[in-house]
Structure formats: structure tokens, C-alpha cells
Amino acid sequence: MTDPESSLPDPLDLQWVDDTSQVDWNELPHLYRIAPLGDKPPDAVATTFNNSRYTTFAYRDGQLIGAGRALADGLDCAYIADVAVHPDQQGRGLGP
């Protein structure tokens, strides 16, 4: 019998990036399309992520496989938005 935990991605195999200056804004719209979260142009995703209080991007072997952002007031409330996970990685513990 296979252990279901063995199919989950190892967080140590991922590179987590929080700095939006390191993001290829042409890569994120592709992830949105295949996730599927719709068709958003590079300048739109750059604006939304750069205007968010918290952002994170997950890479495996140099490929963007996940992204998400949170809007927050810095004290009391935060809202999770635009969580996108590559279809090959969905259901493996990376997203909601």
C-alpha cells in the first residue's frame, strides 16, 4: 500500500520567492491560464501583486508552479487572493 503522504511535494524541493522584483511577469499569466484562473495580461498581474502586502511564488526546477498574494491592513485583517497552482501540482498540498 502506498503512503498518501509520499506523493506530496517536499517543501525543501521548492524555491519560495517573496520578492516581486525576481518574478518574470510574462510567466505568471501562463500559470493563471493553465490553473485555470483566467487570462490576465502581464502588466495586470504585476500591478496586483506589487500592490499586495504579501506575495509568494513557488518554483520547482526553475519553473513557476504556484503563486499567491494577500491583501492586508497590517493589523487585523487579511484576504487571500489569486492562489494559482500548476495543474500537475494541484491536490498535492500547495494551494487551498
Image (tube, grey):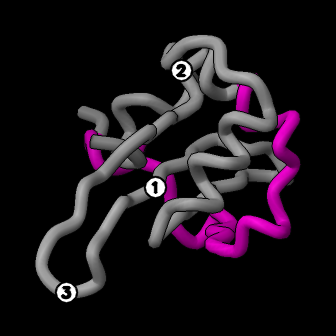
Q: Mark 3 points at which residue?
A: 75
Going by the image, does 51 lie left or right of 27? left
Q: Mark 1 points at which residue?
A: 69
Query: Nearer the viewer's eye, disc 1 or disc 3?
Result: 3
Q: Which amino acid does label 1 sit on?
A: Arg
Q: What residue type is labelled 3?
A: Leu
| CB under 8 Å between discs 1 and 3 | no
Residue at image coords 43%, 41%: 83
Mark 1 or mark 3: which comes first in sequence? Answer: 1
Which secondary structure lies at badge 1? strand
Image quadrant holding the C terminus, namely: top left
Using the image, determine if residue 82 lies above or below residue 57. above
Rendered image quadrant of residue 12: bottom right
Image coordinates of residue 66 in percent, x first then y, are 57, 44
Q: Name the residue under label 2.
A: 35
Q: Does residue 17 show up magenta in the picture?
A: yes
Going by the image, does 83 lie left or right of 76? right
Residue found farthest to the left: 76
- Label 2 to label 3: alpha-carbon separation: 31 Å
Rendered image quadrant of residue 57: bottom right
Mark 2 or mark 1: which comes first in sequence? Answer: 2
Residue at image coords 72%, 47%: 46
